[in-house]
Image: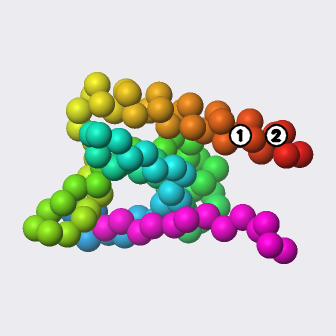
Amino acid sequence: MDNEYKPDLITLIDDDNVEHNFEILDIIENEKGVFYALYPIYDKPEDSVEDSGEYYIMEVINEDGEEQLAEVEDEALLDELSAEFEKHFEEMFDDVEEDQ
């Protein structure tokens, strides 16, 4: 089937060297930088059920010539990005509903 959904996945390693898997929900690139909306992927189904359903917003930073993702610490920027991502999500779901 050509229209089969395949999520874009990314693995991040935290400060304790623990790997965390995420689905890339959306990417915003603007004058303030490049930002990813990430949703955690769990190995155990019961962990998915217990999840709050929140996604993470991460910023692409350049550290020693290498691109990395870091949490957005500026609350005002985070609020602005959240609103923009939510708008994108609504548009995406509207398109999906129209296709059905």
**Pick the front one: 11 or 76:** 76
Question: Where 46 sits versus 83, above or below?
Answer: below
The Cα–Cα distance between marks 1 and 2, rounded to whole angstroms, is: 6 Å
Residue bearing mark 1 = 93
The circle drawn on residue 78 is none
* Residue 39 visible in the current orientation: no
Which quadrant would the N terminus be assigned to in this image? bottom right
Cβ atoms under marks 1 and 2 closer than 8 Å:
yes
On the rendered structure, is 13 left or right of 36?
Answer: left
Residue bearing mark 2 = 97
Q: Residue furthest left?
A: 64
Q: Where is residue 78 in the image (x, y as percent from the top left)?
A: 34, 32
SS state under label 2: helix
Which contiguous range is marked in magenta? 1-13
Task: Please tell me which residue is depicted at 64% across the width and 33% down the height of the picture.
Answer: 90
Q: Main secondary structure of the magenta part?
A: loop
**Pick the front one: 29 or 83:** 29
Q: Where is residue 66 in the image (x, y as percent from the top left)?
A: 20, 69
Task: Please tell me which residue is depicted at 23% across the width and 32% down the height of the picture.
Answer: 74
Q: Where is residue 37 in the image (x, y as percent from the top left)?
A: 46, 47
What's the residue type where badge 1 is placed?
Phe
Task: Please tell me which residue is depicted at 56% across the width and 31% down the height of the picture.
Answer: 87
How crowded pointer 1 is (Cα within 10 Å; few <14, some 14-19, many 20+) is rated as few
